[in-house]
């Protein structure tokens, strides 16, 4: 396997100086030269990861009052560049909703975020490749007016230096590469991971989060399967962890797309399971597999190829029938009929990407004892998403059957 495409986790010193220095206006021209680092604070929302704030380390400025500050003090500009093509896909001023300082002198600049907010995302979509890429982000902060003083001190900042992208839920997953070269992320609950046999949950991402080659360069980042949606993150939340009594969560990244050759990719996922089991005590009777779209297909392929291994399977808007130029059904009826793993299928009736009747409903009719959650649309917290985004419901533990939620059902399954 060729080396992963290099990308900038932190801008080089020269680029950072060029991209993140906010020149003080005339009112600040006589202030001493003082620089401050800042972080990009991200959160994975239902529609993907966004920068929700920047945090400026002004701990050495002195004299900064604690509490709310005027939103007019700063301007924040975002620029995002596709690392493969060099195309600038974000170039906007971010709307500031609040500014505050804590007792340690850290200034948090909250930014408008949410579905449809321009320039807030961390990923770019490459339509021709059908893939997400993590953008190279350059944020510029400019101080427009003096910071308020409390007593002695010179809190004015003449320049700002961009630091890390901080996304706590994503960062809780360690970045790994299997012995054969497959990227994956691993979450292990603190305190219990080394002494108790815990369940293992495997999240299989959609087609947009796999690796691909562009212009002869391989892009395989071990990032997009975490940042494109909350699929892996949902089962690592405190709520889910309490239901499972603690669980390891693995998020492999396909080198391309699972649907291209599920049987060939299945051993790669098996290898990751064995590596995690060698490092942590895993309860082999409680290994669960869940995935969406491409990963919904792969979820079914995992249980077809490994009968009797998984305690549960949750395919979300997956494909079982012919797709594009496939020579036949991706999961033939005979394979669906033979599945004995407890299965909960999820889709939305208005899915315009994968026909829910021909695929999800059809699979439900053939998998004995399976549960089906077929939503009319994908609507969450008042926002209408694409009908293909039914994984949002799973990541929020919304599906329910006979009064039992999805995560409760999964946690109750055992070989």
Image (spheres, grey):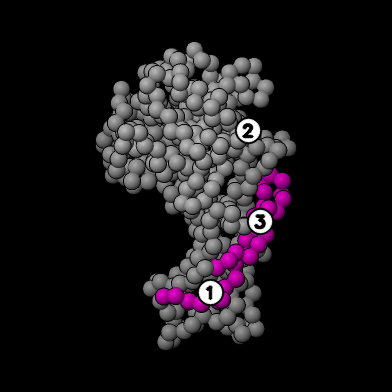
Which image quarter: residue 18? bottom right
Tell me if residue 187 can be seen: no
Q: Which residues are magenta?
A: 67-96
Q: Which numbered disc covers residue 388?
A: none
Report the side of 162 relative to 372 (left or right): right
Marks 1 and 2, Cα distance to the nearest angstrom? 47 Å
**Residue 138, position in %: x, y?**
62, 59
Q: Secondary structure at mark 2?
A: loop
Q: Quadrant of residue 330?
A: top right
> In front here: 290 or 357?
357
* SS under mark 1: helix
Q: Residues within 10 Å of mark 2 (few under 14, many from 20)?
A: few
Residue 90 badge? 3
Left or right: residue 94 compared with residue 231: right
Check the image and name the residue furthest to the left.
Answer: 195
Q: Residue 216 location in percent, x, y? A: 71, 35
- Of labels 3 and 2, the one closer to you: 3
Q: Which residue is mark 1?
A: 71
Residue 82, percent from left and from top: 67, 49
Dot 2 corresponds to which residue? 2
> Residue at horizontal 26%, vertical 37%?
195
């Amino acid at each position: 396997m060729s080396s992963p495409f290099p990308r900038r986790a932190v801008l080089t010193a020269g680029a950072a100086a060029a991209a993140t220095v906010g020149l003080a206006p005339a009112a600040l021209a006589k202030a001493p030269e003082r620089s401050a680092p800042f972080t990009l604070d991200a959160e994975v929302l239902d529609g993907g990861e966004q920068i929700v704030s920047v945090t400026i380390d002004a701990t050495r400025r002195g004299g900064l009052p604690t509490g709310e500050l005027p939103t007019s003090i700063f301007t924040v500009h975002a620029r995002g560049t596709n690392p493969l093509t060099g195309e600038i896909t974000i170039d906007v001023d971010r709307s500031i909703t609040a500014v505050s300082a804590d007792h340690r002198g850290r200034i948090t600049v909250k930014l408008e975020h949410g579905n449809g907010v321009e320039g807030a995302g961390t990923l770019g979509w490459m339509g021709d490749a059908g893939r997400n890429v993590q953008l190279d982000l350059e944020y510029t902060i400019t101080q427009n007016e003096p910071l308020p003083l409390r007593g002695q001190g010179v809190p004015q900042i003449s320049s700002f230096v961009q630091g890390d992208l901080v996304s706590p839920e994503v960062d809780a997953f360690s970045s790994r590469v299997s012995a054969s070269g497959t990227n994956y992320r691993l979450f292990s609950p603190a305190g219990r991971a080394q002494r108790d046999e815990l369940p293992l949950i495997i999240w299989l991402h959609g087609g947009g989060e796999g690796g691909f080659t562009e212009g002869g360069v391989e892009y395989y980042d071990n990032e997009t399967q975490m940042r494109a949606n909350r699929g892996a993150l949902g089962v690592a939340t405190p709520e889910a962890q309490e239901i499972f009594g603690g669980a390891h969560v693995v998020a492999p990244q396909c080198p391309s797309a699972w649907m291209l050759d599920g049987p060939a990719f299945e051993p790669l996922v098996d290898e990751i399971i064995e590596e995690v089991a060698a490092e942590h005590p895993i309860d082999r009777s409680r290994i669960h597999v869940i995935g969406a779209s491409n990963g919904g297909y792969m979820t079914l392929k995992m249980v077809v190829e490994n009968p009797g291994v998984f305690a549960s399977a949750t395919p979300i808007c997956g494909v079982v029938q012919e797709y594009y130029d496939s020579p036949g059904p991706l999961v033939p009826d005979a394979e669906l009929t033979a599945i004995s793993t407890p299965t909960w299928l999820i889709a939305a009736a208005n899915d315009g990407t994968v026909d829910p009747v021909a695929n999800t409903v059809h699979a439900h009719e053939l998998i004995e004892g399976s549960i089906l959650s077929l939503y009319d649309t994908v609507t969450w917290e008042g926002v209408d998403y694409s009908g293909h985004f039914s994984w949002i419901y799973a990541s929020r533990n919304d599906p329910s059957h006979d009064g039992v939620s999805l995560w409760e059902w999964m946690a109750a399954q055992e070989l």
